Each structure stands twice: as C-alpha cells, then as structure tokens.
Image: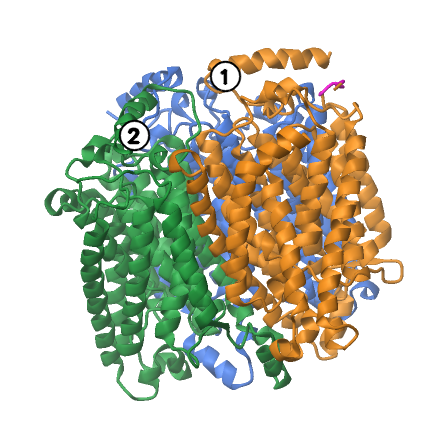
Chain colours: A blue, B orange, C green
Amino acid sequence: MAQASTNMRLKLPITCFILEIILIILFGVLVQYNHETDAKEWYNETQSGHSNYENDFYYRYPSFQDVHVMIFIGFGFLMTFLQRYGFSSVGFNFLIAAFSLQWATLMQGFFHGMHGGKIHIGVESMINADFCTGSVLISFGAVLGKTSPVQLLIMAMFEVTLFAVNEFVVLSVVGAKDAGGSMTIHTFGAYFGLVVTRILYRPNLDKSKDRNSSVYHSDLFAMIGTLYLWMFWPSFNSAVTAHGDAQHRTAMNTYYSLAACTLSTYAMSALTAHDGKLDMVHIQNAALAGGVAAGTAGEMMLTPFGSMVVGFLAGIISVLGFKYLSPILEKKLKIQDTCGVHNLHGMPGILGAIVGAVTASVATVEIYGGGMEAVFPDVADGTIDASFQGVRQAIALAVTLGIALLGGLIVGFILKLPVFGAPPDTVCFEDSIYWEVPGEEPGHEDQLTAVRMEECDKLNG
Amino acid sequence: MAQASTNMRLKLPITCFILEIILIILFGVLVQYNHETDAKEWYNETQSGHSNYENDFYYRYPSFQDVHVMIFIGFGFLMTFLQRYGFSSVGFNFLIAAFSLQWATLMQGFFHGMHGGKIHIGVESMINADFCTGSVLISFGAVLGKTSPVQLLIMAMFEVTLFAVNEFVVLSVVGAKDAGGSMTIHTFGAYFGLVVTRILYRPNLDKSKDRNSSVYHSDLFAMIGTLYLWMFWPSFNSAVTAHGDAQHRTAMNTYYSLAACTLSTYAMSALTAHDGKLDMVHIQNAALAGGVAAGTAGEMMLTPFGSMVVGFLAGIISVLGFKYLSPILEKKLKIQDTCGVHNLHGMPGILGAIVGAVTASVATVEIYGGGMEAVFPDVADGTIDASFQGVRQAIALAVTLGIALLGGLIVGFILKLPVFGAPPDTVCFEDSIYWEVPGEEPGHEDQLTAVRMEECDKLNG
Amino acid sequence: MAQASTNMRLKLPITCFILEIILIILFGVLVQYNHETDAKEWYNETQSGHSNYENDFYYRYPSFQDVHVMIFIGFGFLMTFLQRYGFSSVGFNFLIAAFSLQWATLMQGFFHGMHGGKIHIGVESMINADFCTGSVLISFGAVLGKTSPVQLLIMAMFEVTLFAVNEFVVLSVVGAKDAGGSMTIHTFGAYFGLVVTRILYRPNLDKSKDRNSSVYHSDLFAMIGTLYLWMFWPSFNSAVTAHGDAQHRTAMNTYYSLAACTLSTYAMSALTAHDGKLDMVHIQNAALAGGVAAGTAGEMMLTPFGSMVVGFLAGIISVLGFKYLSPILEKKLKIQDTCGVHNLHGMPGILGAIVGAVTASVATVEIYGGGMEAVFPDVADGTIDASFQGVRQAIALAVTLGIALLGGLIVGFILKLPVFGAPPDTVCFEDSIYWEVPGEEPGHEDQLTAVRMEECDKLNG
C-alpha cells in the first residue's frame, strides 16, 4: 500500500480543529437543554407538582457513570494487551470517544426527533451518545494497531452517522426493542469494523507480528478493562430501559448471564488451549460475551434461568470463535481482526438478537401483566401480537447487518485513500510512530524497532 | 504431599461445566423474580400507589455496584502484589467469584425464606450474594499461590454453603445485627481460610520463596485493589441496612473509621519497619482494617468519634499482626497465610464484633428515638433489653468462630485429596503452571523458573 | 539546603499520632450526626411526612463516591507518571487525603456555621471535605518528589485551614457562586502550591533529573488517574449544587466541556510537540482542563455550546502552558512545578472564574425563570442585580489569589525549616528514600541510585 507520511504535525490538528469547530457551531445552532436540565422549565414542573427526585438525573445518572467508565476505562484498557500499543489503545480510544459522543448527540438528536428545530438533551441523550460511541470503539478493536488517529476520526464520523440511521430504522421504523444494543451496538459495530479491516487488508502484516502480542504486565492492564466492562454491563443494558421493574430486571438478568458466561469461558479455555492452560485472550474477552448476548432480551421476562443459559452459550461460542474461527477468517477471508471483535461482539450480538426475537415472540399478558406496555407497547395496545414482535426483532437484525456491511464497505474504501498517514506494515502495533515514548532500558527488541522506525522516518521525509 | 498432575485440560472444564449446569437447573426450578423485578407484580404495585422511585433498585443499586467493584477489582488486584501470580490472582478471583455469587443466591435464598417453594431475587439478594462471595475471597487470600483453580471451586462450594448456614444462625436464630459483616463475612472468611491453609501446610514451601514477594509494578497494581476497597467500604457496610438515616449513617461512620485507620497504619508502619521506611504490605492491607472493624457497629449510633477510635485501633492491631504475629503463626502454628488475612480480616473482624456487642448493649431510646426499630427491632418492641442484644452479638461471634474453624477443618481435609491438581512446592506462586504466560525478555529469574517447570511437566506426564 | 535526617522512624509516627489524636478528641467534643444521619431525628422527620428517598444520601451519595474515586485513584495515579515515585505518589496522596478530609470536616464545619456549638455532618459535608482535600492534592502536585511525608502533613494542616477561610470569605462574605470550585479548589490549590514550591526552590535539582521523567508503564498507570478524573468530573462539579435541574445541568455542561477540551488538547499536542508526535504529559493533564474551567459556571445556564467553547479554550491554554510557559516559570521565576499544576489547575481555574463572572453578569429572569433562586438567590430576591453578581465573582477570584499567594508564602517558609526530613537534591523523585522497595532485576539505573542512596544514608547517620 502506498503510504503518505505518518507525521501528524498538521494532519491531526487540522482534523481535530475542523471537527470540533463544526461541532461547536452546530451545538450553538441546534442544541438546547431539555425540560429537566433547563432552570426555568424544571422550576415550572416542580411548581406543577413534580419533586426533584423525579428528575431523570436520579434514575439514570449512576448508570450513566458506569457506562462512561466502560467506554473510557473498559474499552480503553481492554485494548492495552498489546505490548507496545498501550498509549495508542488508551489514547486513541480517549480521542475518538470524546469526538464521537459529541457527534452522536447531534446525529441521534436529529433522528430521535427535534423539538421546534432544536435537539433537547439530558442524561438519557448522554447515555445514548455513549452507547453510539461504544459501537465505534468496537470497530476500533478490529483495526487496532493498523490505523492512524486521523483515519480513526474519519471512521468515527461516518460510523456515528450510520449508527444513528440504523438505530432509527431498527427502533422507530421497524419497531424492534434493543435496550442494551445486542443489534444496534454490538452487531453493528463488529460487522462494520470487520468489513473495514477487510478492505484495509495488509498482506505483509506479519512483518509486525513480533509486536502483535502481549507481555505480562500488558495483560494485567487489559484485565482492568475486562473487569470494568464485566462489572458494569448490568448498568449498560439497563441504562435506558423504562424506570422501575424494567431497569431492575435488566440489570439482574445481565448479572446472571455474565456469571454463567464466565464459568463456560474458563471451561472452554482450559479445554481448547495448549496443555490445559488458560489463555488470557479468552478470559479477557469471551467472559464478556454474556453481557452482549443479554443486550436485547435483558429487559424482557427472560428469567434468571434463561439469562444463565444465554450467557453459558455465549461463552462457549466466543471461545470457540477465538480458537477456531478467527484463524480461518484471517487466512481465508483476509479479515485481520486484532481484538477478535467477531468473537466478543459479532457472534454474541447475533445470538442476543435471536434470543430477543424468540423471547419477544412468546410474550404473554399472563407473564407481563400491565407491565407489558413498558416492554412491548404495540403488543400491549393490541396493534400487533407477540409473534409479530418477534418478526420485527428478526427484521431488525437483518437491517443492522445490511447497513453495517454496506457502510463498512464504503467507509473502508474511504479510509484506504493514502492521505491519512496509516502506518507502514513494518511498524504496526507500535506506539512510537504517533507518540513520544519515554526510554526504557534499551534491549534487543528496541533496537529492532529503531531500525524499523528509520524506515518510517524516511517516508516522513 | 503426593501430587496429581497439575494439568487442567479435563479437570477444570469438567468441574466448571458440572457446577454451572447444576446451577442452571436449580435456578430453573427454584428461582423467580421478586415483586420489584417482575413486570406484572411491580406494575400492580404502581397501580396501588407506589412510585417507580420507591423500587429498591434506586436505593441500593449504586451501593451494589460499589460492592461489585470491591469483589472483582478490589480483592482481585489486592492480591496481584505477588511478582509472578497476577494472572491467577485476578483470574481465579474472577472465576470463583462468578461461581460463588450464583451458588450463594441459592444457598442464601434457601435460608432466608422461600416463597411458595421459590427463591425470590432482586438487588438486595445480589448484594448478599456478593457479600458471601467476599467471604470466599478472603479465604482465597490465605491459600493464595498454593492451590489449583479446581481446589478453589470446591472450597467455594463448601464455604458458600457454610456461610449461608452461619449467616442464618447468626442473624435469624441468634438475632444478632451484622450489616457490614464483621462477623459473618470477615471473621468467618478469615478463620475458615486460616484453618484450610493450616491443613494444607507445606513444609517445603520455602522452595518457592523467591516468588513469594512483590516487584515494583506488582505493588502498584495491588494499590489499585487497596484503594477501591478503601473508597467503597462505606458502600459495603451500608449496602443492606435500612433505608434513610441507617444507610446514610453507616456510610459516614465507615468513612471516618477508615480515615483514622489510615493514619495509624502509616504511623505504625514507619515505627515498626526497617529504617523507618514504610512497608507496602502494611499500607495495602492494614489501612483497610478500619472498614472491617466498623462492619457490625457501623449502622448503630456509634458516632463519628467512636468510629475513629475503632479505626485507629484497627490500624494499630493490624500492623502489629503483620509485623509480629504472622511470623509466629507461620513458625509455631504452621499457618502459611499468604495475604495475611488474619491481620486484615481476622483480628479486625473480632474487634468489630466486640465493638458491635458493646455499642448494642448501651443503646437507649433516648439516643435512637423511634429509629430504634430499624436498628434493634427486638429492643424497640420490648422483647429484650439492650444489654441482651449485646449478649446476642457475643454469641454470634462465638458461633461464627465455631462454624468457621470446624468447617475449615473438614474442607481442608477434602481439599487435601490428591486429585485436584495442586502445584508442587517448587512451583507455588507461579502463573505459568495454570496459564499461558507471554514471553518477556528472558532473564536469570525466568531460566530458574524454566528448570522448575520441567519438574512440573514431568508430573503431568 | 541543610538537611535533617530523612529517616522517618520517629518523625512520621509522632506526627501521625499527634494529629489523629487531636482529631479524635475534637470530633468527640464538637461533631454530631446531622438530622439525616441521626436515628432519632430522621425518624421524627419521616413521622412528619418526609420519605426515606428524600434523605440527601440518595441525591448525593453516588456523586460523593465519584468524587472520592477522583481524590484517591484520580489524583493518586495521575502522579504515578514518574518512573521511581509510584509508591510515594499513590501512598502519600492516600495519607494526606485521609488526614485532610478529617481536618477539613472540622475547619469547614466551623466556618459553615455551628449548631449549638456542634458541627453537624452528613453526605454534603463529606463531599465538601473531599473537595478541600482535592485542593491540598493539587498543591502536592507542585512539590511532588521533593518533600517528605511529614512536610506534606504539615502543609495539609495549614492549607486546609486557609482553604476553609478562603471558602468562607468567597461564598459567605463575598456571596460568590463556585459549586465546582474553579476558584476555591483549583485556583487556590494551584497558586498556593506554586508559591510553596518557589520558596522550597532547589537550585541543584538537576542532580535528580534522570528520575524526573516517566517510563512506559508509569505513563499507563498515570492514564488510569487521568481517565477517572475525566469521567467523574461531571459528578465533581455537580456534587453540591441544588437538587434537580441544577445538578443535572452541571453534570451535562461539564461533560461537553471535557469532550471539547480533549479534541483541542490532542490537536495542540501534535501541533506543538516534536515531529508531530503526541506527548503523554499533555494528554494526561491538559485534557482535564475543561473540567476545571467549567467549575464555576457549570451550574449556570452556560448552554452546551458555551461549555464546549470554554473547554476548547482550556485545552489550548493548558497545552501552551506546558510547552512554553512552564520552562519560563522554572528558569526565570524559579518555580519547579513537578506536575505542571499551573497548566492544569492554575490558568484553567482563572479562566473558569472569569467565565463564571461573565455568565453570572448576564443572567436574566427570562433565561432562568423561577430557577434563578437556586443559582443566584440574591439576584432572584432583588438584593442585587446580575451584573453585581459578576462583580462578586471577580472579587472572589482576587480574594482567592491573595489568600493563596500569601498563605503559600508563609507555609513555604515553615516547610523550609530543616527538621521535616526533606530529601537531598540528589535523591528527589525516588521512592526508596521513604519506602521499602522490592528488588527488581538490577540494572544500570539501580546501581546509580544505589550510589546516591549511600549519600543519603550518611546523612541519616
């Protein structure tokens, strides 16, 4: 691949400044406080009988902060497993998340319905913006180590837009339910990213293979990411469900799904890995698949039993994917999936979508009672019956896969333009190409890198 | 000790799969949503006048998440201080916690009272399951580095069961109060684990002594665990107290107890350690003793002054334990307590029980007013007087110690059966026996380990 | 500078014990539960119509815990960037924070108004104590690596006292608003610390310059601190605002300010740093300036647009400060600012104060409606007009700077007394002077340190 200079001296500042200034202008023109964050409007509500504790802040802010930790610490540190890519993993995660959440506020606001030409925002829109950001970070996992920060920002810009379109179609046009985003977040982010990394295929990536692995401490840093994702996934899936039993039930279903998933992950890791030894890649990733798979059905009356079955299967599928499917995808389909997002987000996301469709289709008034309205409003008011809600869920999965694959295709080709400063094949998975890296005791490894860096500097003229 | 193969290829998957499948079946048969997580039941409650913000989720979920972080990050990273046992510390902590919280849901549900043959669950049962898990992780600290993951799962299975029995006797039969678990969690977990490690005594453990210590970065990882435990202990102690003033007061008492404990810990560490230099072992552990010691009396009208006195003493006792008592326990009583749980959970737990008994026995209506009922219901309704509540607390401590010691004895002998794949004395405190460990620059240390690993591989045939 | 022995064997225990015993006695004499933590009083409130969910605990405890994480993990790990000062960064941060929050409870309680000679405490006073502690930790950043723990405790004792005086003057006498503490916390802490480090100027500090820098893993640990500060800053700024819309709005304004700040920080870092490579110092620090700068105006009707403009400017100013101003301050003004607190807390704090003054002065009833009272009570009731509120804000900034500079001057000279065991110039930024440091593979670097340690041991006789 013909490479432009990887020097970010002008490319990155220009991209960041243009994007941020556009964001600020659009926020100035389009965005307003909603009735719960506006001093005058909320005061008027309290005068007409509402109490401060009814402000949505108190229902959702703790969940928001848990989701926020998942986005910045969870995703950021999960990707620090690479031995020489910790700065980029945490740092680019930070950059594209900070951009995406602003852009998502606008895109989702536009599709969720404007109020007199204005987008109204509050804690729920903040959570939704973080959700959309999560999808971008999943795609980041697929291309990790092989892209420049400018490429990532361009990808985020397009992906956020397409995410908002897909979310609108799935939730508002098709009328599917997907509170924890098995489809809209995980399936979308994974397949979008997989197509992008396919288009950006690097036949000579094995020139960087010595850096495409972990060291002891980098695996411990990655476990910080894993555990925060695992612990707070119940908050993630329940963050935007209806108040009361729905939020409570979703968190609990997710908790049990994850616990069951963890046991099947450890079992499968020891069973499939060399010499019966556990593989950190499985523990760091597959143990989370139970959260992904409970993303759609978590708010439904899935029962703790059902949640555990789902989590149990998700862990098995995910480990098998890492062990047997990923090598095939790489060799046969030329999909270089750095973090294995297909195994953590792709297949478990589809599993979650199917579980959601089945669970929806068997919903009855006997089980849900008056609570049917909060979960399936169209079933509750008789517009459709439950089996058709299941069909809606299946359509939503198909739509999501379609938009993700097509979107990833187009965006992949855009990112392939040789102007964004992608690293050469010899210096992938390496922080020092984009970061000032402090010295450590110089060893054999660093000398090898130094040689390769020269190659890179030559390109930068 | 005659050793079976340490190869986990079949042992671990079989154990995990059997346990998880039993869990799933029992959940299917026995477990139901409670009235706050069930769509129909909560809807009916809202129809009869309850508001969504009265759902227990909003009172307890933030505390639950703090407790959850303590269990998975707090305990997990606290134990990463060992130089070559970070994967196992975090990873086995993760595995046995994920198992224990499911098993605890069943055991505690059984003893806390079934509803028409069913266990009803919600956020409070999730907190209680995490609490029970905490007790298992304390015992894990005593045997850290010397046990296989299968041994740990077997230990967890028995310990969770005995925990539920003891908790039932202490809270429901004896009628003691122990919201933060000085007795039921800390004293129980510590003495159970100490007896287990005594039974599993390894006379030749010094063959692994070069790995039974920290390195610079492992001590920093451990501080992540320490600080999360310290910060969230107020949430831990208050997580299942009565709503309102009780939850508020318990969190505050614990906050001041921990602050005072930190100052006495630093003072004692400098005073007792070599050359007046601070010892990371003390800071990582003894500074937390104030949380343990406020576990029983935290919900009572202990006053901030009383809390600080308790914390201050706990820090002193704990450092003295690390410095002077632990070496004696090891040499004279053959108790090899890897993490020093006797100093962090054992003695401070007993201190907390005594403080609880004294504080209960001096409770008066003058101090508690109508709030007496939430804290001491039997004193409030005249069934007993306060001094007898103190006696109940003392009996509860004795019962806890008895069940812990006897239970640990039996379980220790079960774990000694040479079928669970425990590591040989020469390869304790070493991740590579159970984990694929990534390469680092090979040094002198690793070559020594390699030699020892051969020994181990021979056993594995 | 003539140095006393750096041995802490007696100095540190004596200081800790005296301080803690004084604290315990004063708490015993002066401190009581407030009406929401007292069993009797809260029970009486519930009898007169209040519900448990109206207890301030449920409004503020999640925010408190976020602030608590910022204080102990955020500040603590942010300072671990130094290669050989991780134990001290996290450990001294822990010690002085645990002391400061107790002392702040007393000092702030005294100035915030006693109740019949007693200080009443609850979750709001706990947040305020943590806020005051944050100010001390900012000053700690300026002197990091060059002070003994005893010096730090003495500094904390004086600084907390002066903080409480300044806070009282700013909020109660002048009548300014400063919910997130742009002035009272950040400006105060930064300029106080800068004057202290100026007084403690070490002309020969370059003898320790090889340790005054990061290594690869220490920068990753520091990113844990950065991200927790960044994620929870919305909770920080909103923790003590009025319930309802004010808390909700403040969190949201801060969220957008930080997001915009992150993009301008990355842009400026690439633009100004060597070869277009990103500098971890900027990312770790300047990306947080948006939180500081939204500290005063965050609760006002700043609009998301206004918040983003403020954050955008704060990031630019902060990176420019690190790049161009810090070297000048060090060379010309002899201010050795280890963490660059002038760039993260000083200038952005002043920016935040100015933004607050401007935003206050343009407040109208048209914008705030009945909500004016919660934000600007004196404007709402007609005592003053909005422009005068702006004047008050400006006066508050001047007062804060005056007290910080004068206080820092006096305390700096006190700390210069050669009795507190400060490290010699040759062994600054080095853990092993105050900590038992575990061995690592000995390398060239450690041998150099060993030579310097001998020098130090000679002083210790």
Residue B241 x, y percent position in the rendering: 65, 64
Residue range corresponding to the magenta coloring: B2-6
Q: Residue furthest left?
A: C332
Q: Is residue B426 left or right of residue C154?
A: right
Q: Which residue is mark 2?
A: C457
Q: Which element carries disc 1, helix, strand or loop? A: helix
Nearer to us: label 1 or label 2? 2
Q: Which residue is mark 1?
A: B445
Q: Is residue C245 left or right of residue B137?
A: left
**Chain to which the residue tagged by mark 1 belongs:** B
Q: Is residue B398 among the parts visible in the rendering?
A: yes
Q: Which element carries disc 2, helix, strand or loop? A: helix
Tell me the distance, in whole angstroms, between the alpha carbons under discs 1 and 2: 29 Å
**Chain to which the residue tagged by mark 2 belongs:** C
Q: Nearer the viewer, residue A192 or C121?
A: C121
Residue C419 x, y percent position in the rendering: 25, 46
Tags 1 and 2 both on a single chain:
no
